[in-house]
Image (tube, rainbow, N blue to C red):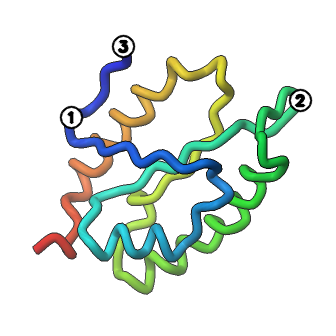
Amino acid sequence: RQEYSAFVRIVPVRCLGSVNTIWVSDALNSGYDGIILMGCQKGEDYQCHFVKGSEMAHERMSKIGDTLEQLNLEKERVQTYEIAITDIHKVPKIINDMAETIDKIGMNPFKF
C-alpha cells in the first residue's frame, strides 16, 4: 500500500485529456489548496487508451498559468505529471512534495 499525505483527495478521471481549465478553476475557487494532474507518459511505450490524452492535457494546462494569475493564486498550486505505469512507486513522493509546497505557500485564500 502506498503512503501519502492524509490531506489528499484523489479524484479519478477516465483520461487526463478530459480535464479542462474550468474544472481546475472551479476546484480552486471552491477551496482546493492545490491540484496534481497525472496522466500517461508519452514516449515509446505510450499507454494512453484515448490515443492523445496526455497531449491534449498538456495543451490545455499550458494555459493554466493565466487562469491562476486571474485568480491571484500561485502557479505552484497546479502541477502536471506524466507517469509510466512502471513508475507508480514515484507517486507518493510527488504527492508528498506537493503537500510540502502547499504547506510553504499556505492554504487557498478562497477557503476563508
- Calculate the distance from the C-alpha at mark 1 to the C-alpha at mark 2: 35 Å
Q: How many marks?
A: 3
Q: Earlier in the sequence, mark 1 or mark 2?
A: 1
Q: Would you identify the image quadrant in which residue 38 lies? A: top right
Give the percent coordinates (x, y) of residue 86.
65, 17
Q: Which residue is mark 1?
A: 6
* Residue pictured at 68% horizontal, 28% vertical: 84
* Residue pictured at 30% horizontal, 28% vertical: 4
Mark 2: which amino acid? Glu
For label 3, the SS is loop
| Residue found farthest to the bottom | 70
Number of the label disc, if any, that sits on residue 1: 3
| Viewport quadrant of the N terminus | top left
Q: Earlier in the sequence, mark 1 or mark 3?
A: 3
Give the percent coordinates (x, y) of residue 47.
78, 33
* Residue pictured at 28% horizontal, 59% vertical: 33
Q: Which residue is mark 2?
A: 44
For label 1, the SS is loop
Q: Is residue 93 left or right of residue 38?
A: left
